[in-house]
Image (tube, rainbow, N blue to C red):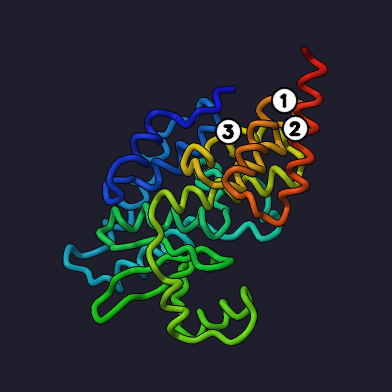
């Protein structure tokens, strides 16, 4: 298995943020699991959705009208919605599967929403809100925050405060909520998707799958100490002692005073002993 980030995805991530097609990037992530995935075909499907909505709108339709038509088409007619019964199914994190099954989790449904909405001229941006990915849209007089996981529902400031209380505990001011509504960059969104997958694969001890995901996470952000440590854990589980030792040692170099330094140091020493036995 090729563990390297595909050249096209690397080019997208290294280019200007405003030029990144988020749906294409998400499909390229899915191609890490589905090697024969036809990215162009699924992008065409998103365009077909947008064309269907656009045909119902007047050219000068207001933003609110476009949002209403988008919600009606995606969630009522096509039936996109949450896979609440199988939330941690990895298919919910792969955009091709979300488009086929019309089921997903907050971040993947948001990417569908953004992809179709932008093709309608809507200024949609992802928001890495704690515990639940959201979308925001610029409208006359301000910003509306939307939840594609719940049919594109518009959320009030009070709704957002309550959600943040549930995610973090304690009282939450309006200022804190506002700080959480900063638009997420494409790189940040893709990392969140990959970390979701990593968590699923770790929980199920699917180490080969976890390895390619972690390789891509580290490839996107090479100085993420905890991700390097976790890649070491995967390498150890796969009995790849040399890369496991290297990752543990790299983690300690990046985070020498971390709380788990002694434990990781012991693992690194053990890996070196196992390497020595091979020689």
Q: Are marks 3 and 1 in contact (CB under 8 Å)?
A: no
Between tags 2 and 3, which lies in front?
Answer: 2
- Tell me if 95 is positioned left or right of 44 in this view: right
Q: Is residue 274 left or right of residue 80?
A: right
Instruction: Please tell me the numbered disc located at residue 240.
Output: 1
Residue beneath disc 3: 33
User: In the rendering, at what x and y percent does residue 132 appear?
Assistant: 55, 66
Q: Which quarter shows the N terminus? A: top right
Q: Mark 3: which secondary structure?
A: loop
Q: Are marks 2 and 1 in contact (CB under 8 Å)?
A: yes
Residue 52: image location, x then y, percent: 33, 53
Residue 212 spot, x, y in % from top left: 59, 33
Q: Nearer the viewer, residue 68 or 18?
A: 18
Q: Residue at x 79, y 40 (%)?
A: 266
Specify whether 66 is left or right of 107.
Answer: left
Q: CB atoms at circles 2 and 3 under 8 Å apart?
A: no
* Residue farthest along the top direction in this orientation: 279
- Label number found at residue 166: none
Mark 3 Cα-neighbour bin, 10 Å: few <14, some 14–19, many ≥20: some
How many residues crowd mark 1 within 10 Å: few (<14), some (14–19), many (20+)?
Answer: some
Is 34 rendered above or below residue 154?
Answer: above
93 w.r.t. 184: above or below? above
Q: Earlier in the sequence, mark 3 or mark 1?
A: 3
The residue under label 2 is 236
Please give the name of the residue rendered at 38% of the width and 48% of the height, measured from the top-left corner: 22
| Frontmost residue, 76 versus 141 | 141
The quadrant the C terminus occupies is top right
Alpha-carbon distance for marks 3 and 1?
A: 21 Å
Residue 15 in the image, given as x and y percentages of width and height: 29, 41
Is residue 58 shown above or below 157?
A: above
Nearest the camera: 188 or 57? 188
């Amino acid at each position: 298995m090729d563990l390297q980030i595909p050249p096209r995805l690397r080019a997208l991530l290294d280019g200007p943020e405003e030029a990144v097609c988020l749906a294409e990037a998400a499909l390229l992530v899915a191609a890490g699991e589905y090697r024969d995935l036809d990215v162009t075909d699924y992008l065409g499907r998103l365009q077909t959705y947008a064309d269907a909505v656009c045909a119902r709108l007047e050219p000068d339709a207001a933003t609110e009208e476009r949002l209403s038509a988008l919600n009606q088409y995606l969630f009522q007619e096509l039936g996109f919605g949450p896979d609440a019964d199988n939330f941690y199914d990895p298919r919910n994190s792969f955009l091709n599967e979300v488009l086929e099954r019309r089921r997903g989790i907050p971040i993947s449904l948001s990417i569908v929403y953004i992809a179709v909405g932008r093709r309608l001229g809507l200024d949609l941006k992802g928001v890495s809100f704690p515990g639940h990915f959201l979308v925001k849209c610029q409208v006359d007089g301000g910003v509306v925050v939307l939840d594609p996981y719940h049919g594109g529902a518009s959320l009030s400031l009070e709704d957002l405060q309550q959600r943040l209380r549930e995610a973090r505990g304690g009282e939450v001011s309006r200022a804190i909520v506002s700080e959480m509504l900063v638009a997420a960059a494409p790189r940040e969104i893709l990392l969140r998707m990959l970390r979701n997958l990593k968590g699923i694969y770790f929980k199920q001890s699917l180490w080969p799958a976890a390895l390619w995901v972690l390789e891509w996470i580290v490839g996107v952000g090479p100085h993420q100490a905890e991700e390097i440590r976790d890649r070491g854990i995967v390498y150890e589980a796969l009995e790849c002692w040399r890369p496991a030792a290297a990752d543990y040692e790299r983690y300690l170099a990046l985070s020498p005073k971390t709380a788990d330094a002694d434990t990781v140091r012991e693992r690194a020493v053990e890996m070196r002993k196992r390497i020595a036995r091979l020689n």
